[in-house]
Amino acid sequence: MVHSSNEPLLIAGGGIGGLATALAVARTGRAVHVLEKASRFGEIGAGLQLAPNASHALARLGVLDAIEPHAVYPRRITWRDARSGKRVTTLDLGERFRARFAHRYVVMHRGDLLDVLLAGCRADERIVLEPSQEVVDVEDRGAGVRVVCAGGATYDGTAAVAADGLWSRLRSLVHPDGDPVAARYVAYRGTVPVGELWEGVGLEDVTLWTAPGLHFVQYPIRGGELFNQVAVFRSDRYRAGGDDWGTPDELDAAFAVGCDAVQAGIARIRRDRHWPMYDREPIAQWSRGRLALLGDAAHPMLQYLAQGACQALEDAVVLADALAAHDDPAAAFTAYRDQRYLRTARVQYSARLFGEIWHVGDVGATLRDAMLATRADDDFAHIEWLYGWRP
Ligand SMILES: Cc1cc2nc3c(=O)[nH]c(=O)nc-3n(C[C@H](O)[C@H](O)[C@H](O)COP(=O)(O)OP(=O)(O)OC[C@H]3O[C@@H](n4cnc5c(N)ncnc54)[C@H](O)[C@@H]3O)c2cc1C
């Protein structure tokens, strides 16, 4: 079946990156067609932290106001030792932070963000959203592309964007580098209704608890109705290709070192599903002809800087600007790559480094804590390069 088309930009994947790109590109006057593998557009998982760089991108997409009812604006990020409960350091997210970065730090339900992006797409007649279409191939036809889906449907467009996530199938058409790199860490995540919380929970903070080989993150979401928790630990049973590692009994054994506050949270975390952690080495090849990579398909990263979605939002804005500035999509994709690849490579490498700093033990941990003890809460120097981004 060949679908008639007015030569839209074709986007494979309707996650945060794909929908943000659809909105950004449609705002420049182009038709966009999003093909999503799942039977409905939606997000699994719970909380999402959005730093000011993401808010700048959301403002450009015209949806920053729409996230306000769903957002929580924490007062600080507090890092504590998971065993002793002692404070390691604090990042103040109050007025000085806002004055510096122009936006507040946001935490929210990732489903709420996707719903806001979806509503924006549905309100734009230039955007067609089509679920239940798994893209399996993109053929470069010189003056355009033909996208092929698993059921045999084909779509013609001016160019294509692969926003198909960490396990991107289309990435191999641009840069075949095999499977993502396993970090040997696994995450458990879930939410607790705020009415069911135990005593002593910090509802004004993002709290990060760390100990050797593990960390635990907590913060409120959905306008303060839900409490989000993410527990991450290194599995000694990791086996490449196996799915029998990072099990709930390992979770309990790893977090047995935790102080009472950590134990209380771990007791309420969901155990029915877990997420092995992966990233990839940064690459410089982001496009081939009229096909470009975006979001996790281009630069999957460990979540330790809470930047994967933020970077996908930045990608969306830059890609739309590049397409608006160049008649030739292939040239636009090269310009987009030029603006993005060193920045996202830095985030990918820095996320790995942050993980090492959080998870270090022995003398390394003592040295880290001693160095951080003298840091001022409103010292933003180390995040300037990251949160200070502007479209
Ligand atoms: C535990 C954890 C915590 C995180 N916390 C944060 C955080 O606090 N802040 C932050 O910024 N980031 C965070 N991230 C990272 C963030 O979730 C990702 O970077 C982000 O979701 C990437 O968006 P994406 O659209 O590129 O990919 P995805 O969200 O993976 O979306 C890809 C979409 O493509 C679809 N798809 C896949 N293959 C095909 C195909 N062949 N054809 C059509 N459709 C297809 C999928 O169904 C999916 O809808 C976290 C990640 C994890 C694992």
Image (spheres, helix red, strand yellow):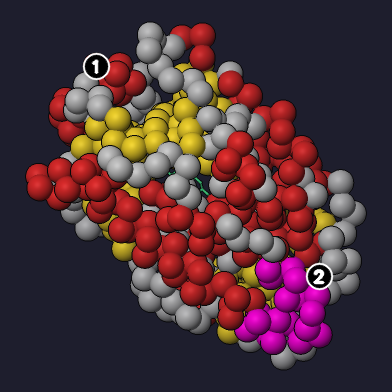
Q: Along the line of sight, which residue is nearer the eye, 361 or 29?
A: 361
Quarter-of-image position of residue 261: top left
**Badge 2 element:** loop
Stretch in magenta = 318-335
Quarter-of-image position of residue 302: bottom left
Q: Is residue 13 visible?
A: no
Against 352, residue 237 (above or below) is above
Q: Along the line of sight, which residue is nearer the eye, 292 or 358?
A: 358
Q: Residue furthest left?
A: 362
Going 51% across and 62% down the picture, which residue do you hit?
385
User: Which residue carries the number 1 mark?
Assistant: 260
**Badge 1 element:** helix
- Looking at numbered disc 2 in the image, what kind of residue is underneath it? Pro
Label number found at residue 8: 2
Question: Main SS type for the magenta part?
Answer: helix
Going 23% across and 42% down the picture, which residue do you hit?
369
Image quarter where the N terminus lies is: bottom right
Q: Tag count in the figure?
A: 2
Q: Position of residue 163 (x, y in %)?
A: 59, 62
Against 389, residue 103 (above or below) is above
Q: Position of residue 365 (x, y in %)?
A: 17, 45
Q: Which of the two discs, 1 and 2, labels the residue nearer the N terminus?
A: 2
Q: Position of residue 174 (x, y in %)?
A: 52, 80
Image quarter where the C terminus lies is: bottom right
Q: Position of residue 357 (x, y in %)?
A: 26, 51
- Looking at numbered disc 1 in the image, what kind of residue is underneath it? Asp
Q: Is residue 195 visible?
A: yes
Q: Residues within 10 Å of mark 1 (few under 14, many from 20)?
A: some
**Disc 2 Cβ-to-ligand 1 distance below 8 Å:** no
